[in-house]
Amino acid sequence: MRYVIVADFWAEDFRGGGGKHSGGAELSDEILFSIFKSKGEDVARCRSSEITDDFLEKEQGSTLILSNFFHIHPFLLEKIQNEFSYILYCHDYKFVGHMQPQRYENFIVPQQELIFVDLFKNAKSVVCQSGLQEKIHKDNLNLDNLINFSGNLWSHEILNLLESLSENTSNRTDRCSIVKSPYEEKGVAEAVLFCQRNGFDYDLIGNRDYTQFINQLSSNTGLVFWAKLPETCGRIVVEGKMLDVHVHTTDLLGASHEPWFNLQGKELIDVMRSKHDEVHKILTNSK
């Protein structure tokens, strides 16, 4: 079986000028591609903007893993829906245009605002990162093809770095980290207020180099991430816990509902290491 992983962007699209910053979805997709290659799978990757009639003609018989698909022409997306075997590997909530189900009571989107319903229903499987994300999809779309992957993906190199840093806590400062973000829904203002009300010293952190960012995150004893929308998993918080940092967050964080969320340091790192084999098994066994 041949697999094609489709994303709107790949990590290198954010590295112009020497930077190494990309979002969690791009980082996760990059690892997913490398996992399939390491397992000896016949796998390719492409940007959603590169999907054409000719491309689909050449990939007849392939299974498409759709991570993001906003740049696929509607006609071609319908062709994929009707003629291809495909899996949705979900990083968000694409069944509503603004992708923010928290705007509605109990996260239930009005029927007239739902989009891509048939795309979700016709997928071999819809893979979610947490039980919270799975439930929101189920409640809105009544799907019977949902799978909770329960986690996210990090490279072995990064997991080794996280393990090394988690074992070296003696030089940490008794302060909380707050990750800078221009997006209101990331709750930076609320995180700052939480620290001020509780008498916690804090630093606003951020670095376009991912490795340097991880080192920043490990330099303090705490992390405050005030999720204001239902985070599908919450990579930053999971990274903090793998670093054995004390985290403060809300129940809108998908990871906070998972059975491994009480783990810290190496125990949690080992769980995320096991996700490499688990995600491969899920995606290659989808019926």
Image (cartoon, helix red, strand yellow):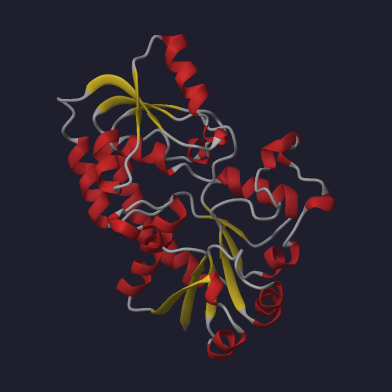
Residue at position x 68%, y 75% in the image: 81
Horizontally, is 235 left or right of 265 in the view?
right
Say whether residue 96 is left or right of residue 45: right
Residue at the front extreme of this rendering: 17
Q: Is residue 131 visible?
A: yes
Q: Residue at x 58, y 85 (%)?
A: 56
Q: Which quadrant holds residue 17?
A: bottom left
Q: Report whether residue 266 is seen.
A: no
Horizontal side of 149 relative to 164 (left or right) equals right
Q: Position of residue 197 (x, y in %)?
A: 47, 10
Q: Answer above or below: position of 80 versus 227.
A: below
| Residue 260: image location, x then y, percent | 42, 40
User: At 53% across and 47% down in the image, what residue appears?
Assistant: 130
Q: Which residue occupies the foreground of this view, 50 or 64?
A: 50
Residue occupying the point 20% across, 38% down: 165
Residue 33: where, in percent of width, then height?
Answer: 39, 68
Q: How many marks?
A: 0
Which quadrant holds the C terminus?
bottom right
In the displayed structure, 1 sits above or below 176; it is below
Residue 203 position, x and y percent, is 33, 24
Q: Is residue 193 above or below residue 29?
A: above
Which one is nearer the viewer's eye here, 206 or 220?
Answer: 206
Q: Nearer the viewer, residue 12 or 135?
A: 12
